[in-house]
Amino acid sequence: MLAAALGASLAGCSSTGGLRAEQERAAKAAGGKAAVNTPRWTFAMVTHSGDGDTFWDIVQNGAQQAAVKDNIKFVYGHDKEAQRQSQLVQSYIDQKVDGLIVSLAKPNAMKDVVAKAEKAGIPVITVNSGAEESKAFGALSHIGQDETVAGEAVGEELNKRGRKKALCVLHEQGNVGHEQRCDGAKKTFKGDLQKLYVEGTNMPDVQSSIESKLQSDSALDAVVTLGAPFAATAVKAKEQAGSKAEIDTFDLNAQVATGLKDGSLGFAVDQQPYLQGYQAVDLLWLYKYNSDVLGGGKPVLTGPQVITKKDAAALEDYTKRGTR
């Protein structure tokens, strides 16, 4: 009888125990409670975001959700100026945080401070920008899309749509990821692709610059912006210029999803920023808890995914809640 009871107990553990435990963890996370009993470590994220960038709001949403689940205190800092971004990272090193997540849009300015974090025994994961530099700088993993591959996907999509002359709008000078996107598109696009540099923190300037370019060159039949907030501005510029150019963009948010549905935008390239934030926190927790590392020295890719009108309706609710 004892053997039978023990056998039944073991069978119950193997058949339902894992599922039940997972359901309990999911319920706790959904209720705003930690799903683990590991120490309350502090993880800091420092990005190159300017003020009001909805892309980074989505990254933060993912990071905060993972932080709740993993019993992490999550703090966030950002600055579009590379030197000030580096100083923010240094301030978190001085505070002896337990893990760091950084973007490497301007990697040369970040190299020394990432090395300082490693020397201080603080594990670092890079996100979004700097895939090529991440491993060399000593980061555990890089989470994001390959910007060159994403750009190549844009060039191929423009070809499918029969476009002949495109404008690639770069809103942050010196951002290596932005250059890689435009260069990747130029590589695969069979037509002519030109770059236009604008000051991304000044939307009226962005609009007037695109408008002026469209007015001066009626052959332009596509405009590609490198961030979701700039897509709507490009649409306004197109309307003011009386142009028939298609407006396409990198990244996705609620406004872009609406634009795809109503046809004011042609397509968007989604790199799943929510996943970048969520996975960064989760991988740091896994490293602290179990010395796990993903990627094998290669980036953990979250994109690109080309989103068109037919996909927009299915993603619209997710964009409204700030997770896509």
Image (cartoon, grey):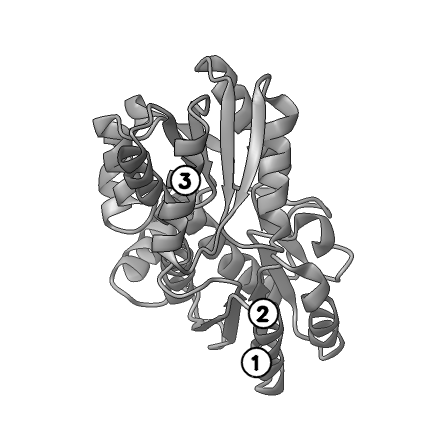
Q: Compare residues 237 and 73 and report the one nearer the observer.
A: 237
Identify the residue position indicated by label 3 in the image. 212
Residue mark closest to the camera, 3 vs 2: 3
Identify the element where label 1 is drawn: helix
Identify the element where label 3 is drawn: helix
Q: Amino acid at mark 3?
A: Ser
Q: Position of residue 35 (x, y in %)?
A: 38, 63
Query: Does any portion of residue 1 appear in the rendered image?
Result: no
Q: Position of residue 249 (x, y in %)?
A: 42, 36
Identify the residue position indicated by label 1 in the image. 92
Q: Amino acid at mark 1?
A: Tyr
Q: Compare residues 97 and 3 and report the one nearer the observer.
A: 97
Identify the residue position indicated by label 2 in the image. 100
Going from N to C along the chain, the mark reached first, 1 or 2, is 1
- Residue occupying image coordinates x 35% and y 49%: 229
Query: Does any portion of residue 104 appear in the rendered image?
Result: yes
Q: Position of residue 121 (x, y in %)?
A: 71, 76
Left of 300 or right of it: where is 243? Answer: left
Disc 3/disc 2 C-alpha distance (Å): 42 Å
Q: Are marks 1 and 2 in contact (CB under 8 Å)?
A: yes
Disc 1/disc 2 C-alpha distance (Å): 8 Å
Q: Position of residue 44 (x, y in %)?
A: 51, 72
Which residue, as the protein is rendered here, is positioned at the far bottom?
Answer: 94
- Residue occupying image coordinates x 61% and y 60%: 125
